[in-house]
Amino acid sequence: MVILFGLLTALPAVLSVHLLEPALVLPAFSVLLFIEAGFAVIAARLIHLPDNGESITLWDFAGGFALIGCAAAVFSEPDQAALLLTEQGRLPSRP
């Protein structure tokens, strides 16, 4: 489970570093982590595992994703997030 969530986080993060402008990486990474936190919550609700203090659960993953997503949002500037949203909505111009 840890490897799956690691790959689901690392692959889009590496792609965003290579495909987006440097100013847009943190807002995009923040959005990615919030989406992954949502998927982890949905999976935790669907898969009912007994609560055990000795092992990592899907709720722990959801909390970790949300916490890191908040940190990425705090470190990014508001104008970077606005730039991310306007870049995604703009159609490419034709020469």
Image (cartoon, rainbow, N blue to C red):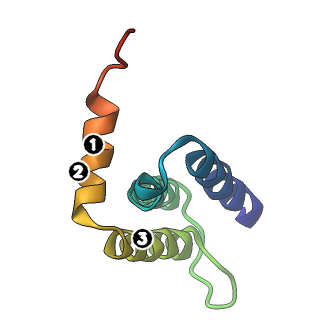
| Residue occupied by mark 3 | 72
Q: Quadrant of the N terminus?
A: bottom right
Left or right: 4 with respect to 12? right
- Between label 3 and label 2, give the one nearer the viewer: 2
Q: Mark 1, residues whose alpha carbon is within 10 Å: few (<14), some, or many (≥20)?
A: some
Q: Which residue is mark 2?
A: 82
Q: Amino acid at mark 3?
A: Ala
Residue sitting farthest toward the bottom = 53
Foreground: 89 or 66? 89
Tag 1 residue: 85
In the rendered structure, are the residues bearing label 1 and label 2 in contact, judged by CB atoms less than 8 Å apart? Answer: yes
Name the kind of residue labelled 1 in the image: Leu
Circle 2: is it few (<14), some (14-19), or many (20+) Cα within 10 Å?
Answer: few
Tell me the SS state at disc 3. helix
Q: Is residue 36 left or right of residue 86?
A: right
Amino acid type, callout 2: Ala
Secondary structure under badge 1? helix
The answer to which of marks 1 and 3 sits earlier in the sequence is: 3
- Foreground: 55 or 91? 91
Residue 3 x, y percent position in the rendering = 76, 61
Check the image and report above or below for 21 versus 58.
above
